[in-house]
Amino acid sequence: MPRCCQLVMGPAGVGKSTYCKLLQEHCAAQQGPGTQRRAVHIINLDPAAEGQFAYAAPEVDVRELITADDVMEMMDLGPNGALVHCMEYLLENLEWLEERLEVFAEGDYLVFDCPGQVELYSHIPVMKHLVDFLVKGPLSLSVCGVYLIDAHFMVDPSKFVAGALLCLSTMIALEVPQVNIISKADLVDKEEIERVLDMDSAAMVARMGHLAAHGRLQPLTHTIAAVVDDYTLVGFLPLDPNDENSWDAILAQADMALQYGEDLEPREPRDDVGDGGTEDEDAMEDNDIQQSL
């Protein structure tokens, strides 16, 4: 099984580190028949990360190579310029990243906690080159993007359209399968989120009346809403940290995009399970049959 990885992306403060932590905890807690245990390893790719992470210390940290604070001090750059320089420096030293990732075993599940600056995904090809290295380079990882949008964006149609376009632009730029997630869904009325997600373009425009009311903005508003409505690839899955079903849905979508576990042997259903024998007893019977053969 190839090493699979999620690139966890989204604006600053959307909850990327928290997502990584909860994903790791959820996978570690998976037990019982029908579940897939996976070894989740978190890699920090944000050179501007400060303080403690929501999760335990990352197993690979780009700040061992370079930090945004050092670049700001040495090169007299602002925060955004320093971050861009750090990511370009990482691209110039990809052997450092390769050495630290090749130690992970086949079947390991890598989760990259990525920077939140939008320009890294839309204005410059830094993240695209990094993705190409992970997929087409010597590591040959199976990569899936995970883009987080704050649930508070979803109750305002204007913000929802802006967030959906960010997701779409990232999908186009990176050219990898992507799962779009509504983070912090437990903090917002779920019915309101569902109403916004179920809107067609006409309903979006009607709700964005402050934009559509202006004559010169009306055609643009209609066109943007139609793009969001027509491109059904920009779908969203709500993430409620307290709801196991939401985690299962997200993992199922990511696993399908990564083709995770497709080379595992499927478990054949047994008709006699539940007819008086336990699964352990059924397994013992299978062993006895095999030994007799």
Image (cartoon, rainbow, N blue to C red):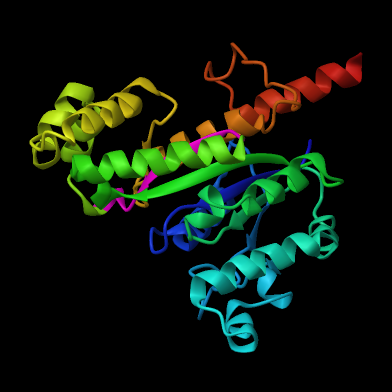
Residue reaching furthest to the top: 271
Q: For the N terminus, which image quadrant?
A: top right
Residue 18 drawn at (x, y percent): 45, 61
Q: Residue at x 28, y 49 (%)?
A: 151
Residue 247: x %, y % from top left:
44, 42
* Residue that lies at the very extreme toward the front in this rendered image: 216
Give the side of residue 54 with respect to residue 72, left or right: left
**Is residue 10 something one can see in this rendering?**
yes
Q: Is residue 203 above or below residue 99?
A: above
Residue range corresponding to the magenta coloring: 176-186
- Compared with residue 69, is residue 158 higher up or lower down, i.e. above or below? above
Report the label total.
0
Can residue 272 be found in the magenta stretch? no
Q: Is residue 13 above or below residue 157?
A: below
User: Residue 220 appears at what percent x and percent y?
Assistant: 25, 32
Task: Residue at 75%, 47% (x, y): give it.
Answer: 134
Question: Which residue: 39% across, 23% down?
Answer: 232
In the rendered structure, the answer to whether residue 218 lies left or right of residue 260 reads left
Q: Is residue 214 above or below residue 83?
A: above
- State the residue in front, 279 or 149: 149
Q: Residue at x 45, y 36 (%)?
A: 168
State the image coordinates of residue 42 (x, y, percent, origin top left): 63, 60
Q: Where's the C terminus, which quadrant?
A: top right
Residue 291, image quadrant: top right
Say which of 124 and 96 sits in front. Answer: 124
Residue 118 left/right relative to 70 = left
State whether residue 251 appears in this view.
no
